Amino acid sequence: MSDLLINRLNAVHPLSDELTVHLRDNLVTRELLKKDYLLKRGQVCEYIYFVERGLLRCFYEKNDEQITSWFMKEEDVIIAVNSFFNQSPSEENIVALEHTLLHGIHFEQLQEIYSRFIEFNIVGRILTTRYYILSEERLYFMRRERARDRYLYLLGTQPDLLQRVPLKYIASYLGINLETLSRIRSDIKNS
Amino acid sequence: MSDLLINRLNAVHPLSDELTVHLRDNLVTRELLKKDYLLKRGQVCEYIYFVERGLLRCFYEKNDEQITSWFMKEEDVIIAVNSFFNQSPSEENIVALEHTLLHGIHFEQLQEIYSRFIEFNIVGRILTTRYYILSEERLYFMRRERARDRYLYLLGTQPDLLQRVPLKYIASYLGINLETLSRIRSDIKNS
DNA sequence: CAGAAAATTTGATATTTATCAAATATTTAT
DNA sequence: ATAAATATTTGATAAATATCAAATTTTCTG
């Protein structure tokens, strides 16, 4: 059932049989319908999830508007970064944009695994590094590029998102206005 | 000599004596004068450094201008993220803004340490997590806030940088124009 | 210290992007 | 299939920020 996750972890660094069994025993599975919330602002992000299938959106609220900080889809690991690692109330909300299937593990369980199966720290380190690199890369594009180029970058790296996500969320993810994004798109079409 | 670094690592997770000795044996020390380069675009970032004292700037080039991506000072760990982790040519340059003293370890050595001293993966995981959180936090402010608020955030979180770094680098770090930053500062003064 | 270089500020103007308002198109639910 | 809700586009205008030019201040170097 959680084979995909176990496979992916194994590909990072081989897991012992004991650890594999332990993981399976401690995973919880959650299913979300479109518009269901996985996490609401103010709650502590207690679980780290792996997306087996589906798509979620992470967003903050600023005044009245929602600012999308992340999309998470199949094979992504998802957390509200600050809230999970510090076990503090989240500024972020996480909501399903599609019918979604998740496998998760509780923060405390994860800490226990890290101390009981030292080698799992290898996996943790490598996965964290990967997400760190991605975060830096996005930071780079946010700083370096104009709205149009940020859009083109997303189009180049995650074209499927543009099919699956309403433009208003794409716009706030890119840090631009819905109308501006719409104009950028029509500009690109006519060129 | 590298006591500060060893202390800081110990505070993350206690190091065995054997590992401590091994680390000391494999650390290299580098001293940079102001304007000396630690890394130039195209080179592979082969070392991960700890800043014992001093200040460095990490920047990209875009057309003719330099875009500052990061400042690193005392007690920071520094790398060109993508280049180091993937051992690929760097897009980034790293240059000293002040007289700087560094302790570093080679990528291969670090990998060897990770495999020989499994528990060091705990340290690696935790430190990577910390930098990941910081990266996400900066991303959040880059997306969420206007130029003025990004400046105020920096002023709030790293006031010393504003004393130590020329405004043009601060401006490009914040993703705004030097002149605009100057105006923001004078606005703030008169309010 | 003097001159040169670098850093910062200021002004005029252009460009980019946001905001407000509304029309049109698409999707969803009954 | 139809009405309602949601998403997208378009237009007019405003606000934020960038660009170009130059003056002023500060820092560095011989």
Image: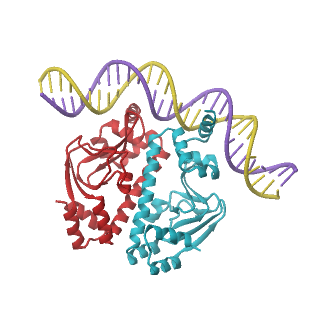
Chain colours: A cyan, B red, C yellow, D purple
- Image coords of residue A123 (percent x, y): 42, 68
- In the rendered image, which quarter contains the C terminus of chain B? top left
Relative to the observer, which residue lies in front, A34 or A7? A7
Quadrant hosting residue A128 = bottom left
Residue found 56% across the figure and 46% down from its top: A155
- Image coords of residue A191 (percent x, y): 60, 33
Residue found 50% across the figure and 72% down from its top: A106
- Image coords of residue C8 (percent x, y): 32, 32
- In the rendered image, which quarter contains the N terminus of chain B? bottom left
Quadrant hosting residue B97 = top left
The reply to whether residue B12 is in sight is no
- Image coords of residue B37 (percent x, y): 26, 44
Vertically, is A190 above or below A36?
above
The reply to whether residue B93 is in sight is yes
Counting every numbered tag in the picture gives 0
Task: Say whether residue A126 is left or right of residue A177.
Answer: left
Residue found 34% across the figure and 45% down from its top: B42
Vertically, is B170 above or below B81?
above
